[in-house]
Amino acid sequence: MPVPILAACDVHKSYGRGATRFDALRGVSLEIAQGESVAIIGKSGSGKSTLMHLLALLDKPTEGAVELSGHDAAGLSSAVLNRTRNSTFGFVFQQFFLNPGSSVLDNVTLPLRIAGVPRAERNRRGMAALAQLELESKAKNRATDLSGGQKQRVVIARALVNDPSVIFADEPTGNLDTATGAVVEDILLELNRTRGITLIVVTHDEDLANRCDRRVYIRDGLIVDDLTSSAIAAANAEVAA
Amino acid sequence: MRAVDVVGDAIDNTLRSKARTALTVVAIVIGSFTLTLTSGVGTGINAYINKTVASIGARDVMTVTKTVPAAQDSEAPIAYDPNAPTSSGDSMGGEEAKPITAAELKDLARVPGVLSVEPTLTVRADYVQQAAGTKYQAEVGGFVAGMSLDLAAGQQLGWNASQNQVTIPVTYVQPLGYASNAAAIGTTVTIGITAANGNATTVTATVVGVSVAGFSGGGSLTPNAALSRALYDAQSVGLKEAARTSYPSAAIRFDPAATAAEVTALKARLAAIGYDGATVSDQLGIYRTAIDAVVLILNGFAAIALLAAGFGIVNTLLMSVQERTREIGLMKAMGMPGGSVFGVFSTEAVFIGLLGSAIGAGLAIVAGSLTSGLLAGSLLTDLPGLQIIAFDPVAIGIIVGTVMAIAFLAGTIPAVRAARQDPIDALRYE
Ligand SMILES: Nc1ncnc2c1ncn2[C@@H]1O[C@H](COP(=O)(O)OP(=O)(O)OP(=O)(O)O)[C@@H](O)[C@H]1O
Ligand SMILES: [Mg+2]
């Protein structure tokens, strides 16, 4: 079996200390292979976002280790961590986090700007990313002037612009109506299927979860179930039989 | 992140909340305006003094007077000493310097380092007259060999020429009946003088130059050595030998290559035998010290204004960091190093500093040049060449640089706060 692109090994995460100490994750182990689409599902407060932040190397576990392609992230320098988040990962959040004052194009090219890519190339790649999401005509608009669905597509363009191998999406459809949400889901799963981008989606939404290869159920900081589509298919087949 | 993008971001952010930036900039403008203007005054006047010192020349000349006993503490009564000479009656306001006699001139000449000694000949002329024209009152200025005057026409006095030579002030040209400054050169003027015995006599001299007023004199008739001597002799007819050969001061010459330390040592040797020596630069240095002190005080006020402006920058940027918590968190999540975040915010502070100081200095240059021009045409017409407020690009560069440095320091507080921000806190949904 190839080395998983991301792995959590018996990860604990606690917030606060003493009497106010809260254990958000209590021993989570998970391996994610390159090209998988994984849904992390659970009730509010169960620790989904906390797990995603650890996998995305935005936070460090209290105990246990997060591995990036087999290397313990605790051993990586902050420069390597920054570079990884900048060019290996792409982020889509429930809230858009678009800079209201800047143009759509400038918002999309933000990761490239952080990476130090010269302006001309930045704009070329930004336009290409916008083209994939059919938003070229909005490039010069201010980000605030777009509809919710358009904004989330801009956010996806921003996540894509630096050619990531993993996209993290925390409740990407949480802010959208069902129809627009479905469009965004289609785009994300399409990217997973056609470009082999690993997709890690945090969601409440069973419909979205069901469209992923794999569903990880989390409750009170522990993984309670980890199902792959083939296993589900098998289970369903059993029920049917 | 590329430097050009850091700067671009910083400028964009500064211009994003215009009202807030404008108010912060105004505070800096006030400080740097004042600082530029006061240093301009210092530059202007000191440049004038320096130019004057340089143009006067006579670097190797020291004016020597007898040391006046230290002024008594006005409150304390002086103990009576029957042997001490009483001061000659009712002279108010301290003693005058005692005259230097011919014998004492010889003593001075023997002091090591003194190359030559010449007495200062004080002459009181009654009038000056050109041909048979109107007689005008005239002062005869003191002049030291080696000095040069600010001339509007003609040439410097031939100090050692046997001919009687004189320069006339530019203000006398028209009254004396000359068509132009140049027309005066080479003509002969008559100087009227009253001798000690009461007889009026005259001395004639050739005009070699037309002088412009300045610190070096030039506002009066300036004679060469031959004319000085002729006038002095005419004036001294009827005086006793002792009175004729005692002088209020003397000019000594020393090695032009003498270092400052050697000049100081020479002054010490003169002081040891009871004389004060002052070079031309010492004499004008008094003005310079006074001006520097005034400028320093004014700069102090400007510095206080800038300090206040510094707090304004801290405040503005803290608000900006607060407002942009999300944006900063997002950029850090996307791999922006804390150092770059610090860079963006401190560049923003420096940009605000640059904006404020450049505007302030610009306004000061405009205001200063206008004022200076107005004053030169009105109040200061007697001192042509004095540009009361002058701007030295280096000094302005230093002011702008200093303000930017203050802004940078003020910006570090918010910039560090932004750099330390945890991206997760910013990304958590509220
Ligand atoms: N900085 C923090 N300090 C203290 N407690 C925290 C902190 N961050 C998260 N928690 C707690 O950790 C638990 C897990 O939080 P997390 O955000 O991972 O939940 P979630 O599963 O993403 O929930 P939701 O679906 O509502 O987003 C919650 O009970 C939360 O209150
Ligand atoms: Mg969450």
Image (spheres, helix red, strand yellow):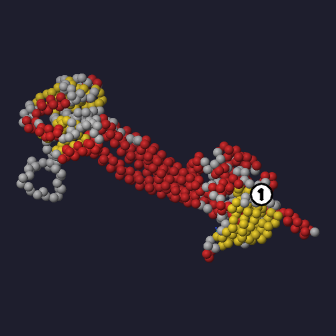
Quadrant for the N terminus of chain A in the image: bottom right
- Relative to A97, does residue B136 appear above or below in the rendering? above
Quadrant for the C terminus of chain A in the image: bottom right
Picture coordinates of residue B326, whole percent (x, y): 63, 59
Q: How many marks?
A: 1
Which residue is pictured at 9% across the width and 56% down the height? B80
Crowding near the residue tagged with mark 1, few <14, some 14–19, many ≥20 C-alpha atoms within 10 Å: some
Considering every residue shown, the one lying at the far bottom of the view is A19
- Relative to A221, does residue A34 appear above or below in the rendering? above
| Amino acid identity at mark 1 | Gln
The answer to whether B114 appears left or right of A90 in the picture is left
Whether residue B168 can be seen here: yes
The answer to whether B130 appears left or right of A139 in the picture is left
Name the one closer to the observer, A176 or B211: B211
Q: Which residue is mark 1?
A: A34
Name the one closer to the observer, B103 or A1: A1
